């Protein structure tokens, strides 16, 4: 399922990252890699704050839909 | 021989804190050539021979952001003697990703694990000896905030630089990837000048890095040859080249880190708990509003206004009471004296006008200092006798008799010039040109400093990053960033700190858009002008002032939507993704340093343009051709000045806006020095009749008056704000684009206000109305047209 739908507070394994190559690359640099884990910390209107590799990253809804967990 | 050490690391890893701790006040801050990325260099406190360069915070050495390009060009072309790679100890895995790349550029590297105090507090353990062994470089634990391990890390870096043994990365990629590297090296890299760079280049060529292909000047033949190697590798590993490299790097880090790091039990960190509240879906906006109100209340309405008034009316005005002792007493006394004086004067005016003394109650005029509005009050003969007795028995109060009176700079300079018997042209130039110009620059500095303390605090404690997250949804629609809210809010007080607050916006496009639109919001200096137009032309109608704010908000939204579809801001908006630093208390030193750096750069860069412009306006205002030749003019001879001639020459521009007379044009020009000058200039020009408001009412209709108001609110801001725009845009082209757009937009809105307004004020439908309606249509088209630069 897309990351937007993931429940808060549970670690989820990243299965796939879609979208434009540059965006995907940037997400990879920030630690979103397939096989890695991501936890949703909080959510406002679809925008998320997540925990990836111990750093807190804010992503908007559009992007959070491209990360499949 | 000097040693150059570069600091490299992720954003928010504490690199800047380390840099400040290492170099103290011995810094040079500027921009990297040709870009708006900040460049910082400083001499190491312990050894002056050592120069430390602070590279921008980056996540990788790929060529996709300005910061990355700047950093890697520096490492590849300038070849510093050593690199200190700063790593956030609470986030080793992600930070080591950059480390694996830095180790490939063939320069000695030492790793500094920062924030060890936080790591220890969390109960985590990092085995640095083991980590150092695994990656093959010295690793030092430091805490930049607590000043721990700093000399150790620099000494290790100096040793590494002296030894000059280039770093060879221990990490090896998958066999078939390494095979491809070997091919690439053989094909085109065996004769490059610096063989330490071979591995770096082969990896980048494998990733199809166009900047490197270009730099090495590879022929199309070689590129297609390499492409074959890459493709066979991609097929074998079933992924694209860049993802293969990224994946392998993370796998490699995963294998090291398991042995080196012991994490305490995982739970919600205190930072996460704060986020639960501050970015909570219900509480986020109310808390944000409260924080903004506090910032606004202190930096704009209370402390900020006090600071600006002190600087403008005190230091660059008549003078001020030391520690404000005696100010209140003096003001009371001065007010009382003035109230009595005005009744006595009113009596004299009555006698002069009527030839006889009043026999009963009489009216006298009272003029408002700021807006020049005249109201009438009635006094009886007893009032007059009492007032006369008061004025005769008391002297006009002298501020010097109350507390310690410090005269203002213009007074001091004026007295000095007078005692030296300087001729009036020189003293005019110095007083009205230079001192007034310098005052215009420095008058805003105290307020800017107050605001910058807040911004620095919000930024370094971590809240600013969350602001972007909270507000982004709303502002994204107008092509702005979530952080644009702050510049605009501050802009209601003064546009200069508002424009400078846009610094906190990372995206270049969002920042430029914010700079271009921030001054549409009426600032404090425009208020007297708005009040004057409302009073003189609209009979004090209460809707005029709110309409000025709505006009500003409207202008920002319309401009944002229109501009983001133009070539200037072409392309999809960057998707919103950013790292949020953990909350922490900033140190006082860092907050003050950030305040000082920004304030000082305003004084330096904006100062010149403001000073020059005010001198030019002074010269054209006070000189002109009169019946007795070219000479300096008195204040009320402004109609003979060069400026008036310029006004007459350009007044035609404003004919379609309904105020094509030189008076309005000249007022608009002097408004560029400071917007409140519009009031003063109109006051001087229309004073001949004795009734400024009446003369203005005769000169403007409701439609042309509103057009005049709209134009002056939206057009280019004052020179000081333009200086700030120039400083922040850091590009002549963008500066003129911004000013040109603002003036053009203001003209169009003025045109619509006048031409369409005429229909509603009963002046009828004319040919001009068609143009007004056409202008509205163009705006609507600009807002709703398809964005041809947008993908899909």
Image (cartoon, coloured by chain):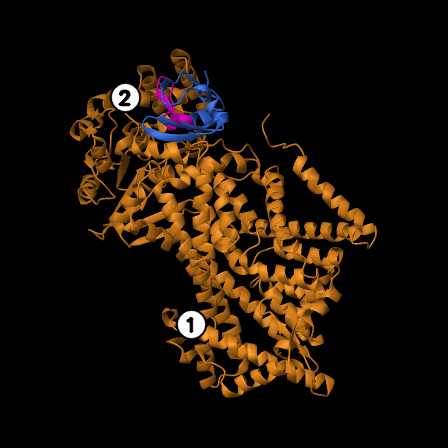
Question: With respect to residue B326, does A59 lie above or below?
Answer: above
Left or right: B383, with B28 as reference point: right
Disc 1 element: helix
Q: Residue at x 42, y 72 (%)?
A: B327
Residue at point 27% right, 32% down? Answer: B90
Disc 2 from disc 1: Cα separation = 68 Å
The residue shown at (19%, 36%) is: B140
Disc 2 with disc 1 on a shared chain:
yes
Kindly identify which numbered label has been placed on residue B109.
none
Disc number placed over residue B327 in the picture, else none: 1
Mark 2 highlights which residue? Answer: B254
On the image, the x and y values in percent for residue B175 come to 30, 15
Magenta residues? A26-41
Q: Is residue B625 magenta?
A: no
> Is residue A35 located in the magenta-colored stretch of the structure?
yes
User: B131 or B306, which lies in front?
Assistant: B306
Image x and y of residue A7, in percent: 41, 20
When the figure is inspected, residue B337 is found, relative to residue B614, above or below; the finding is below
User: Which tint was used for chain A?
Assistant: blue
Task: Pick whichever of labels 2 and 1 is earlier in the sequence.
Answer: 2
For the residue pair B760 and B205, the one nearer the viewer reads as: B760
The chain holding disc 1 is B
Q: Is residue B504 visible?
A: no
Q: Badge 2, how many Cα within 10 Å: few under 14, some, many 20+?
A: few
Judging depth in this view, the residue of B399 and B698 nearest the camera is B399
Q: Is residue B407 left or right of residue B782?
A: left
Q: Secondary structure at mark 2?
A: helix
**Residue B303 appears anywhere in the view:** yes
Q: Which chain is orange?
A: B
- The residue mark sitting in front, 2 or 1, is 1
Camera-nearest residue between B714 and B79: B714
Number of other residues with Cα within 10 Å of mark 1, as a class: few under 14, some 14 to 19, many 20 or more: some
């Amino acid at each position: 399922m897309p990351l937007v739908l993931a429940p808060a507070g549970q670690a989820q394994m990243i299965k796939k990252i879609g979208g434009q190559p540059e965006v995907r690359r940037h997400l990879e640099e920030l630690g979103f890699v397939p096989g890695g884990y991501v936890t949703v910390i909080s959510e406002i209107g679809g925008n998320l704050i997540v925990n990836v590799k111990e750093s807190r990253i804010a992503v908007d809804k559009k992007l959070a839909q491209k990360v499949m967990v | 021989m000097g040693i150059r050490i570069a600091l490299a690391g992720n954003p928010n890893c504490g690199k800047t804190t380390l840099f400040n701790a290492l170099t103290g006040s011995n810094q040079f801050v500027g921009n990297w050539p040709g870009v708006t990325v900040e460049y910082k260099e400083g001499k190491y406190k312990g050894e002056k021979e050592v120069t430390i360069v602070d590279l921008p915070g980056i996540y990788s050495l790929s060529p996709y952001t300005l910061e990355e390009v700047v950093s890697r060009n520096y490492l590849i072309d300038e070849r510093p003697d050593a690199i200190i790679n700063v790593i956030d100890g609470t986030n080793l895995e992600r930070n080591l990703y950059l480390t694996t790349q830095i180790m490939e550029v063939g320069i000695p590297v030492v790793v500094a694990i920062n924030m060890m105090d936080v790591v220890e507090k969390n109960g985590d353990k990092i085995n640095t000896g083991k980590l150092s062994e695994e990656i093959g470089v010295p690793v030092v634990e430091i805490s930049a905030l607590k000043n721990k391990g700093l000399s150790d890390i620099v000494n290790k870096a100096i040793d590494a630089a002296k030894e000059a043994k280039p770093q060879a990365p221990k990490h090896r990629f998958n066999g078939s990837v390494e095979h491809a590297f070997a091919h690439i090296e053989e094909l085109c890299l065996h004769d490059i000048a610096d063989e330490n760079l071979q591995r770096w280049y082969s990896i980048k060529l494998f990733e199809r890095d166009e900047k490197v292909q270009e730099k090495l000047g590879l022929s199309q033949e070689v590129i297609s040859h390499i492409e074959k190697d890459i493709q066979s590798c991609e097929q074998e590993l079933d992924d694209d080249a860049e993802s293969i490299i990224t994946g392998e790097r993370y796998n490699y880090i995963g294998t090291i880190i398991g042995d080196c790091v012991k994490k305490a039990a995982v739970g919600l960190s205190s930072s996460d708990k704060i986020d639960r509240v501050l970015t909570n879906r219900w509480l986020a906006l109310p808390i944000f509003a409260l924080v903004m109100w506090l910032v606004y209340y202190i930096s704009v309405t209370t402390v900020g206004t006090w600071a600006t008034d002190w600087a403008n009316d005190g230091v660059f005005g008549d003078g001020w009471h030391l520690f404000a002792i005696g100010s209140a007493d003096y003001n009371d006394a001065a007010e009382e004296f003035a109230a009595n004086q005005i009744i006595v004067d009113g009596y004299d005016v009555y006698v002069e006008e009527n030839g006889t003394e009043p026999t009963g109650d009489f009216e006298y005029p009272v003029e408002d200092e700021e807006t020049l509005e005249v109201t009438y009050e009635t006094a009886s003969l007893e009032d007059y006798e009492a007032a006369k007795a008061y004025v005769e028995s008391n002297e006009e109060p002298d501020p010097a008799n109350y507390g310690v009176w410090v005269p203002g700079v213009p007074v001091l300079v004026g007295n000095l010039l007078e005692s030296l018997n300087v001729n009036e042209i020189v003293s005019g130039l110095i007083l009205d040109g230079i001192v007034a110009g310098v005052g215009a620059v420095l008058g805003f500095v105290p307020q800017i400093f107050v605001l910058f303390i807040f911004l620095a605090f919000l930024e370094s404690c971590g809240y600013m990053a969350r602001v972007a997250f909270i507000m982004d949804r709303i502002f994204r629609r107008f092509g702005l960033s979530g952080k644009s809210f702050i510049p605009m809010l501050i802009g209601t007080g003064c546009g200069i700190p508002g424009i400078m607050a846009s610094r906190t916006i990372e995206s270049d496009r969002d920042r430029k858009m914010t700079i271009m639109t921030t001054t549409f919001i009426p600032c404090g200096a425009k208020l007297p002008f708005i009040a004057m137009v409302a009073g003189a032309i609209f009979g004090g109608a209460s809707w005029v002032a709110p309409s000025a704010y709505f006009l500003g908000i409207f202008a920002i939204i319309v401009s944002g939507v229109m501009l983001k579809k133009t070539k200037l801001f072409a392309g999809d908006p960057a998707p919103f993704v950013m790292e949020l630093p953990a909350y922490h208390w900033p140190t006082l030193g860092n907050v003050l340093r950030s305040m000082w750096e920004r304030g000082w750069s305003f004084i330096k860069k904006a100062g010149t343009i403001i000073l020059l412009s005010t001198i030019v306006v002074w010269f054209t205002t006070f000189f002109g051709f009169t019946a007795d030749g070219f000479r300096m003019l008195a204040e009320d001879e402004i109609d003979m000045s060069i400026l008036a001639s310029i006004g007459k020459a350009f007044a035609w521009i404003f004919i379609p806006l309904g105020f094509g007379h030189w008076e309005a044009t000249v007022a608009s020009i002097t408004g560029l020095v400071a917007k409140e000058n519009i009031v003063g200039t109109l006051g001087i020009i229309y004073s001949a009749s004795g009734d400024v408001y009446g003369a203005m009412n005769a000169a403007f209709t409701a439609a042309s008056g509103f057009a005049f108001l709209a134009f002056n609110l939206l057009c280019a801001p004052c020179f000081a704000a333009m200086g700030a725009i120039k400083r922040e845009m850091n590009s002549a082209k963008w500066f003129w684009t911004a000013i040109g757009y603002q003036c053009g937009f203001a003209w169009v809105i003025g045109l619509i206000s006048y031409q369409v307004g005429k229909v509603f004020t009963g002046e009828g439908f004319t040919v001009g109305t068609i143009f007004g309606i056409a202008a509205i249509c163009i705006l609507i088209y600009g807002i709703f047209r398809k964005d041809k630069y947008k993908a899909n």
